[in-house]
Image (cartoon, grey):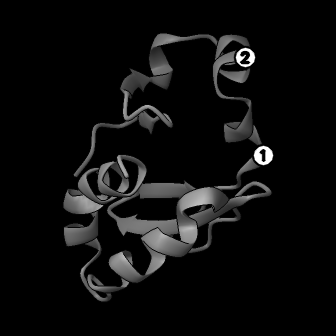
Amino acid sequence: MGCPGQIVIIDNNSRIYCLNIYDFEEDVIKIIIPVLFECKFGMFEKDIPALEWHNFYLGMGNHLMVKDPIFDEFYPKAGEYDGEPGMLYQKWIDLVLEIISR
């Protein structure tokens, strides 16, 4: 299970950023990650992603948003963990890094 408020971002250069939204004022988060406020997060796969993003519910209140440029390659890999959101939670970083490092 992830830490409450933790956000992990992987950029196009395979750099990983980890922050906790509770460490920042909302206005600062809107500057750092504006797309976060375009998403609607619910429970039990009821998320609505921002335009050009796709949602994966990872269980236990954890949400993964994958951007269009890697979605077509990420989706089949994520499908290997259908019915096992906890396993996708453990593997998503490796999957994303594998895709963008090519």
Near-viewer residue (49 or 92): 92
Mark 2 surroundings: few (<14), some (14-19) or many (≥20) residues within 10 A? few
Q: Is residue 102 above or below residue 31?
A: below
Near-viewer residue (55 or 77): 77
The earlier-in-sequence mark between 1 and 2 is 2
The three-letter amino acid code for the residue at tag 2 is Ile
Q: Is residue 75 left or right of residue 15?
A: right
The three-letter amino acid code for the residue at tag 1 is Glu
Quarter-of-image position of residue 79: bottom left
Give the labeled residue for mark 1: 38
Q: Say what secondary structure mark 2 lies in.
A: helix
Q: Is residue 27 left or right of residue 65?
A: right
Mark 1 surroundings: few (<14), some (14-19) or many (≥20) residues within 10 A? few
Residue at the spot 41% in from the left edge and 83% down from the top edge? 76
- Marking on residue 31: 2
Residue at the spot 62% in from the left edge and 11% down from the top edge? 25
Q: Position of residue 51 (x, y in %)?
A: 80, 57
Q: Is residue 87 left or right of residue 100?
A: left
Q: Position of residue 101 (x, y in %)?
A: 35, 46
Q: How many marks?
A: 2
Q: Say what secondary structure mark 1 lies in.
A: helix
Q: Is residue 53 above or below residue 71?
A: above
Q: Is residue 87 above or below residue 41?
A: below
